[in-house]
Image (cartoon, grey):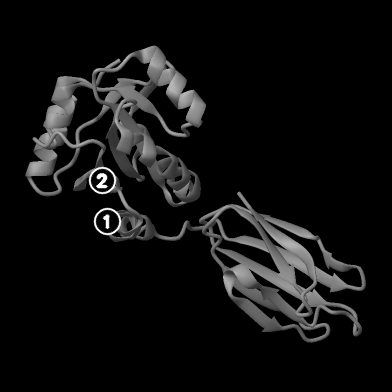
Amino acid sequence: MTLTAVTALGWALSSAQSLEKVPTLSFDDIRGRHVQLADYKGKVVLLNFWATWCAPCREEIPDLINLQRLHRGQGLQIIGITYPPENLIEVRRFARKLRMNYPVGMGTKETKTLFSSSETLPMTVVIDREGAVRDVIEGIMYPDEFEQKVNPLLSSQPAPKGKLQTATVVVGTAGYRPRSVKLRRGIPAELTFIRKVEKTCGTRIMIPDYGIDRPLPLNVPVTVALTPNKSGRFKFTCGMDMFRGSLVVR
């Protein structure tokens, strides 16, 4: 289950010739599934070379798992490629223990050296949405490197057309209805709030995690716009430190 030499060579040429297209990458992952780079067209790909016996690699992988979870909705796709010597059973056991949430393939020394003559591990190749190599990061990819070299590529994606998320929330004596609004991460949303009763704590729309704080007059619809950029539950507050509803982002 190794990368083909032709594919790897194409990747090396892409890196050397300044943002040329990357040829199709094809391999079987450690679960036996066939993976092609073409399957991730339009995504930002991080090709991470690593090994189970490499201490910095083991240190970095939990961060990569977290990045994949946080930025999947923005189009990030991490692909792990092992560096020999490796044993398939050991790699499977390692990936299962850490719950690695991205594809992992068994690589060769030749694959890695086509990108860099350095023997450094880990090493991450940054590929943009058009399939061009934008950077090669040797060693652990630190948060500031991700912000400088990867995040701008994620932010370059235009907002999806025709997929605006909308919801109406009525504020009454019983609080917010519905109490939870489900949203998809990375897709713009507009939430309309309507206060129906005079005496309620909900005289403001406050969603602290998104910096939203707006007055909510009686019987006047107020719409707030946001793009949910991370998964989780984000609570509404009525302005008196009372949390009465939430956004659930997946």
* Residue in the picture at 33% in, 59% down: 147
Report which residue position mark 1 lands on: 149
Numbered circles on residues, count: 2
Q: Is residue 153 above or below residue 110?
A: below
Q: Nearer the viewer, residue 250 or 113?
A: 113
Q: Is residue 49 above or below residue 233?
A: above
Q: Who comes first in sequence, dot 2 or dot 1?
A: 2
Image coordinates for residue 152, horizontal then vertical, percent = 32, 60
* Residue in the picture at 43% in, 19% down: 92
Name which residue type carries label 1: Lys
Name which residue type carries label 2: Val
* Residue in the picture at 77% in, 75% down: 241
Location of the N terminus by quadrant is top left
- Tell whether label 1 touches label 2 (CB within 8 Å): yes
Give the class, few, some or many, for how many residues have Cα within 10 Å of label 1's Cα (few <14, many ≥20).
Answer: some
| Residue 90 appears anywhere in the view | yes
Q: Is residue 138 above or below residue 110?
A: below
Q: Is residue 198 above or below residue 68?
A: below
Q: Residue furthest front?
A: 55
Side of 3 where 115 appears, left or right: left
Dividing the picture into quadrants, the one containing residue 145 is bottom left
Q: Marks 2 and 1, Cα distance to the nearest angstrom?
A: 8 Å
Report which residue position mark 2 lands on: 126
Give the class, few, some or many, for how many residues have Cα within 10 Å of label 2's Cα (few <14, many ≥20).
Answer: many
Q: Nearer the viewer, residue 15 or 164?
A: 15
Image coordinates for residue 129, horizontal then vertical, percent = 30, 48
